[in-house]
Amino acid sequence: MTTTTAFRGLVPPVITPLTDDREVDTASLERLVEHLVAGGVDGLFALGSSGETVLLTDQQRDTALEVIVKTAGDAVPVMAGAIETATSRTIERARVAERLGAQAVVATAPFYVIVGPTEVERHFRAVHAAVGVPLFAYDIPVCVHSKLANDLVLRLAGDGIVAGIKDSSGDDIGFRQLLVSLREAGLEHFGAFTGHEVMVDSILFAGATGAVPGLANVDPAGYARLHAAVARGDVAAARAEQERLIRLFQIVDAADPATSAGMTRGAGSFKTALRELGVIASNAISLPLRPLDESESARVRQILEQAGLL
Amino acid sequence: MTTTTAFRGLVPPVITPLTDDREVDTASLERLVEHLVAGGVDGLFALGSSGETVLLTDQQRDTALEVIVKTAGDAVPVMAGAIETATSRTIERARVAERLGAQAVVATAPFYVIVGPTEVERHFRAVHAAVGVPLFAYDIPVCVHSKLANDLVLRLAGDGIVAGIKDSSGDDIGFRQLLVSLREAGLEHFGAFTGHEVMVDSILFAGATGAVPGLANVDPAGYARLHAAVARGDVAAARAEQERLIRLFQIVDAADPATSAGMTRGAGSFKTALRELGVIASNAISLPLRPLDESESARVRQILEQAGLL
Amino acid sequence: MTTTTAFRGLVPPVITPLTDDREVDTASLERLVEHLVAGGVDGLFALGSSGETVLLTDQQRDTALEVIVKTAGDAVPVMAGAIETATSRTIERARVAERLGAQAVVATAPFYVIVGPTEVERHFRAVHAAVGVPLFAYDIPVCVHSKLANDLVLRLAGDGIVAGIKDSSGDDIGFRQLLVSLREAGLEHFGAFTGHEVMVDSILFAGATGAVPGLANVDPAGYARLHAAVARGDVAAARAEQERLIRLFQIVDAADPATSAGMTRGAGSFKTALRELGVIASNAISLPLRPLDESESARVRQILEQAGLL
Amino acid sequence: MTTTTAFRGLVPPVITPLTDDREVDTASLERLVEHLVAGGVDGLFALGSSGETVLLTDQQRDTALEVIVKTAGDAVPVMAGAIETATSRTIERARVAERLGAQAVVATAPFYVIVGPTEVERHFRAVHAAVGVPLFAYDIPVCVHSKLANDLVLRLAGDGIVAGIKDSSGDDIGFRQLLVSLREAGLEHFGAFTGHEVMVDSILFAGATGAVPGLANVDPAGYARLHAAVARGDVAAARAEQERLIRLFQIVDAADPATSAGMTRGAGSFKTALRELGVIASNAISLPLRPLDESESARVRQILEQAGLL
């Protein structure tokens, strides 16, 4: 069995547009996928954190994944999150994702239940054994409250258990060390993706396989230009594009922090920007989150204008 | 609408016995419920953390709840966990629990998704609005990584949104302050339960409604005696019984900490003890956890003997 | 060598009154010590967290300790904090405290420097070896960011390294387990003090040696009555007094949380209350903290009135 | 008043060599400073975390700083840590550092005492007002347990309170955003230094003023080559040197994690490497830490050989 996958380059975590009564807005989702493919992305990550996967019912998850897979067609491959509290539930969701056409599944460490490295390793090995498509490890300690240690990732990579990692740990230092260790171990085929928005140029120059930035929902073409600049070794152009995207990323500060948390700032502002750009119909978001209000949306519009997108 | 419930006194979180291939062992679960009722419990909490709810599939959850409700019959009331990452999923599980006969549902703050007090309050209000039985708030920051502040609990209690709280926060100091504040606010009917094993005498003397100790799976009669001693104001007898239970609680240290985490120590040792006591058939536990091995089980047996249970 | 000490019962952590230019107000400090002794305390803890020890210069620390020791005279014994980042600095301060007349010294785990249990144990053993008076361990993870595990405390107690513990961990559950373990190990002489204000009745009934509540600066007589009620086995009187003190403890919520943190809420409100009671001259507090303002002070006065102290 | 300083480029945090009885080894310290200057560093940071400042007595601190300032002479400028729990103590140490010849002082947020952003800002403003040399902010949440938010740093920079920052937060993402914000605010003169070892190439390419890597004690020439490669825009050479240094940085994993923590891994392994290189006499380290033992030292030697330093 090979763990090499078709995934490389720019693979945005697709947000899940909702109608105002908080059901999946399939027409908006189709337009969003077309927007991303037209922007030059290399793949799509469905049902990630930005896709509100833990806030959706199983039926909503299935609807979203079906639309994404169908709309992506042969244009780009799709990986899908199977993000659940523990092993049997993760396997259930991973098998559904495989059946619905995902070309890889993405799982986190277990959460809610308190686990150590032994349990995390057992979890990934059991999920791998139960599904027929490659498995990516999603390192997101801010949500699951444990960190995937580099030695565990190297062991799972070396044994062909996980085909890649999406690093949303905030620990670029550790990720850089992982890149060096993977190369030392002859594991260059392993897919090492950063999930962050603002150091993409640096991480790609350091040898990462690609990036999974939530902000690429809003400006896929900008991130595609950044990837292209890195690919041709143009440090100045990459840095200029990255810094433009860093300024655009300020939309995540549009929501009043006193009455909003985490995902409202991320997915909530991405959705608001996409509505302003005419890609999706509403910035509705799942309970218990709230959508950005009018004054917060005005701030998003202002930043979009400064970034040259409006 | 009243938020007063039938729940008071000793309401253990029922562990979920599994067969060696990790399916719900319904025969063992029936025997466990009979063991608890015979031991003198006042109610049952199905599908809590100790019940491995986040490690079970939805179908396994349903099976476990059906057996518990049916076996409990009219003997004692049953509350059931609807423990899910966010609002719509919690409502789905709460409605299933209601349909299967639970007389109250128990929900935590959202988890995985990062939330603040605003989102937590919106969550409980939405869940309350969607179900027909009383709602208990389950405060378990070690699993959900946010704490229910006393002022939020008082507001939800005063508005009749939640009928009670199960406090597994480890913060007995804050819980004591909550008890005083509830009385000051005229909310004596609110159900204030401690989820901890070792300060039950103190918390009951301070005015709590009851206790939800996982260890009561192993020794329901001991906790029933402790409740009775408190009820008749016998400080010395309560303390002696509590200290015996503290020594029995050392079974949670039987598992090697280098290769086990959280729930293996709790539910894993309770299951092992119940197997040794002949109540359930196996100490199997859901992936990614592992059951206690033979040498760890020997240590459990030794402690059971010292506690006079074997 | 014996580790038995003269300390038992009510041993408040003495706050350090300052003049408006933030120097030690020795006249106010004398009056405070007299207020505490008159209130019926059994000992004094100088230079603890509430005493602003980490905010004072070494010279200010010396001045405060000298005044406390001299004013206490033979009335009650004094223990003094030697709270420093690491071993050599702690030993320096412990030797000064011993020279200035402290009958015991109190040290925390090292802080700022990242340590594990091995380093913490080495630290206490080295401090013990370097000073001639008994050593108390001060467990305050909210400040030092590591917790003293019960097995470490038991080992240090059994080896005569530490004569007692002041538990400010917030973990009453662990402290209750420690009390049982100390008795099982024949270490009843070990001084087990709670540093918290609101579960003193429960912890004393569970067998603790005493309490070190910061709020006892404000109402030493109230805590003395609580201790006396426990000593004569009067559960109802102890609980009534404890609940009155819990309401009084609401003074820590007087400061606006948006512009104040930690110690402003504690020492800052205690100082304000003592100024209102006429014991000390000013509620000045060390930089970078700020004193309570007039409207916050009005709230403190209101609570003092409700508690029958004004 | 200007906040522009002489500091730029490579400014290692100088470790403090000790004799086997744990006093400052002034001869070794002189040799170390000469080793660093000969290696091509641009400045020196005395009494930082790697310099064991919180583990040294005030007298030891003074001795170390005097030797560093005197040995550095006119070759390179010296900044000195004034790392203390709170404001008055920090000011005391900052004034001593200024008197002993430091050309800038470096302070952290207060620690042990619990603080919020208001207190942190008040702290830096008070320290700035009390000293005559430029003040650097040291962001090291792993030690002080609070993070300097970018908006606070920007405000302190804009008001001329702090002349620069040493970022040891591990948050390269936030630091990259800070670099963009500083430029947008016209604060290019502000000194933005990374305190990390492994992303120096990326951070310098992103526009940082310099780096303060502890590992540069061991291989100053390597880091000097890395800085030079970045300065001439040679991405490939910078990356190759950085990756060599990442492999060298594995010396921090030489100490057995079961019996060592934090600084033993860092300063302890740097000291061991410097002893192996013949620069300092002993790898002794302050209590409660322990030096690397013989088998751990053998592992350090092996890595030094692989890196071409032995």
Image (spheres, coloured by chain):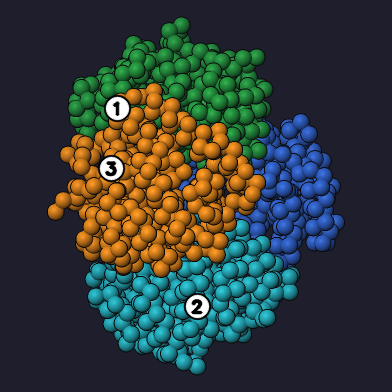
Chain colours: A green, B blue, C cyan, D orange
Q: Earlier in the sequence, mark 1 or mark 3?
A: 3
Q: Is residue C137 left or right of residue D199?
A: right
Secondary structure of the residue carrying numbered label 1 = loop
For marks 1 and 3, give the CA distance: 16 Å
The amino acid type of the residue labelled 2 equals Arg
Q: Which mark is residue B25?
A: none
The residue wearing badge 3 is: D8
Query: How dense is the environment of label 1, judged by Cα within 10 Å: few (below 14), some, or many (20 and up)?
Result: few
- Asked which quadrant contains residue C133, the reply is bottom right
Q: Give me the chain letter of mark 2.
A: C
Q: Nearer the viewer, residue B158 or B59?
A: B59
| Of labels 2 and 1, the one closer to you | 1
Secondary structure of the residue carrying numbered label 2 = helix
At 55% across and 33% down in the image, what residue appears? D306
At 56% across and 26% down in the image, what residue appears? A184
At 72% across and 57% down in the image, what residue appears? B250
The residue wearing badge 2 is: C95
In the picture shown, does residue A182 fall above or below C20?
Answer: above
Percent position (x, y) of residue B292? 76, 44
The residue wearing badge 1 is: D232
Q: Quadrant of the C terminus of chain B?
A: bottom right
Asked if labels 3 and 1 touch by Cβ distance under 8 angstroms, the answer is: no
Q: Give me the chain letter of mark 3.
A: D
The amino acid type of the residue labelled 1 equals Arg
Percent position (x, y) of residue D28? 46, 55
For marks 2 and 1, give the CA distance: 56 Å
- Asked which quadrant contains residue B247, the reply is bottom right
Percent position (x, y) of residue D177? 30, 36
Q: Give me the chain letter of mark 1.
A: D
Q: Is residue A216 left or right of residue D160?
A: right
The amino acid type of the residue labelled 3 equals Arg
Asked if labels 1 and 2 touch by Cβ distance under 8 angstroms, the answer is: no
